[in-house]
Image (cartoon, rainbow, N blue to C red):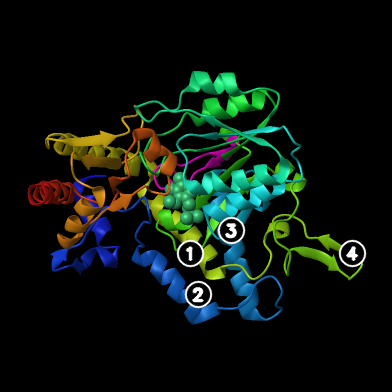
Amino acid sequence: LAMMDVLKIRKDFPILQREVNGKPLVYLDNAATSQTPQQVIDVIVDYYSRYNANIHRGVHTLSQEATDVYEQSRQKIQQHFNAAHPYEIIFTSGTTHAINLVANGFASLLNKGDEIMVSALEHHSNIVPWQMLCERTGAILRVIPMDLNGELMMEEYHKLLTNKTKLVFCNHVSNALGTVNPIVEIINAAHNVGAAVLIDGAQAAPHIKADVQELDVDFYVVSAHKLCGPTGVGMLYGKEEWLKKLPPYQGGGEMIAEVSFEKTTYADLPHKFEAGTPNICGGIAFGAALDYMNGIGFEAIAAYEHELLEYATKQLLAIEGLKIYGEAKEKTAVISFNIEGIHPYDIGAILDKLGVAVRTGHHCAQPIMDFFKIPGTVRASFSFYNTKEEVDVLVESVKRAKAMLL
Ligand code: PMP
């Protein structure tokens, strides 16, 4: 992306025009949620203005139109992630819902003493559902350790894998540090011992286009709100054989074939996992968001964001006492840092006064903070609509915060 393109792209995002505390907004909390372009907002407005109706069951025109567009969106998502079939894409309310769905399903497949494995770099949403699964089944949770660079210790991983390992789950990209994990190696090694793999793509999806067939991954999960889409919608990709094996998660309308008080049979994929009225508009807007991002191109996005990352890292490291956590060889445009002697929250509060939005705290990844023995960090996370000028504002603002607080 040339700078010219970025200025043009910024015009697509109405929110980027606003001010915060009398200053132009510098939005650097993209890892928490991305902003929404007018093209996606228009799709949402169009849905509620023209064809809002419940799907899959109506004979009337509006219902059929809504069903068609919703199912077309499923196909867009299928094509984007290169799933073999549209019915391998299950609409969920987000990554958290998708992980809970799989964890719940594995309760019927695990026995006491089976092992499941998580990485040390996870978001709480990819830890807690599995701990709950262990409580239910007597399975044992193992942890792939990390090193001081914020990279997984792959030798340890290979040692931990045995024929007791039934499932491995790991994020593609860490939300707290930006580390890109070696998921190809993780998936292949797990398959060698017969274990299934779930990859949490919540942080990868805005930067990297994953090909689920090439990866040969069993489950891949994302949230639309991190990829220029709305909140409350996401995806579970599952290989057909696995989705057939897992029992339904929630019961209700849409997910049944026949219901009587004696016996109920379940609908085929994908409806088996889609009980109740879904987030119809959200599902449609999810597809529109992928169209928007593909229009820019994921290679261009990744290359440009990498430039921003290098530019920001160099300038921030020049500030005395500033330490960046996570120095993985491969990372996305996330910088997690602290300044010696200052609480991250205090820096975040001053940055907000200066119009700069960053995240402070443990980023729903307390085990990572415990590993570094810190309460949290300041996290600046960049998107393709951020500029070098905004990085300059961040750096100047951090310097001001430091001068005020020390
Ligand atoms: N996993 C990762 C790596 C994340 O960054 C997030 C969101 N911060 C989640 C899972 C949870 O996503 P959601 O809250 O959209 O369900």
Q: Please, what is the dominant secondary structure of the magenta stretch?
A: loop
The residue indicated by pointer 1 is 285
Q: Which quarter of the figure has residue 158? A: top right
Answer whether labels 1 and 2 touch (C-beta < 8 Å): yes
Q: Amino acid at mark 3?
A: Thr
Residue 27 versus residue 361: which sits nearer the camera?
361
Q: Is residue 329 left or right of residue 169?
A: left
Q: Earlier in the sequence, mark 2 or mark 4?
A: 2
The residue indicated by pointer 3 is 92
Q: Residue at x 70, y 46 (%)?
A: 136
Answer whether labels 2 and 3 touch (C-beta < 8 Å): no
| 205 part of magenta stretch | yes
Q: Earlier in the sequence, mark 2 or mark 3?
A: 2
In three-dimensional space, the C-alpha distance between marks 1 and 2, rounded to whole angstroms, equals: 9 Å
Dot 4 crowding, Cα within 10 Å, few <14, some 14–19, many 20+: few
| 339 part of magenta stretch | no
In three-dimensional space, the C-alpha distance between marks 1 and 3, rounded to whole angstroms, equals: 14 Å
In three-dimensional space, the C-alpha distance between marks 2 and 4, rounded to whole angstroms, equals: 37 Å
In three-dimensional space, the C-alpha distance between marks 3 and 4, rounded to whole angstroms, equals: 26 Å
Secondary structure category for the residue under label 2:
helix
On the question of residue 205 being in view, the answer is no
In three-dimensional space, the C-alpha distance between marks 2 and 3, rounded to whole angstroms, equals: 19 Å
Answer whether labels 3 and 4 touch (C-beta < 8 Å): no
Dot 1 crowding, Cα within 10 Å, few <14, some 14–19, many 20+: many
Q: Is residue 176 left or right of residue 91?
A: left
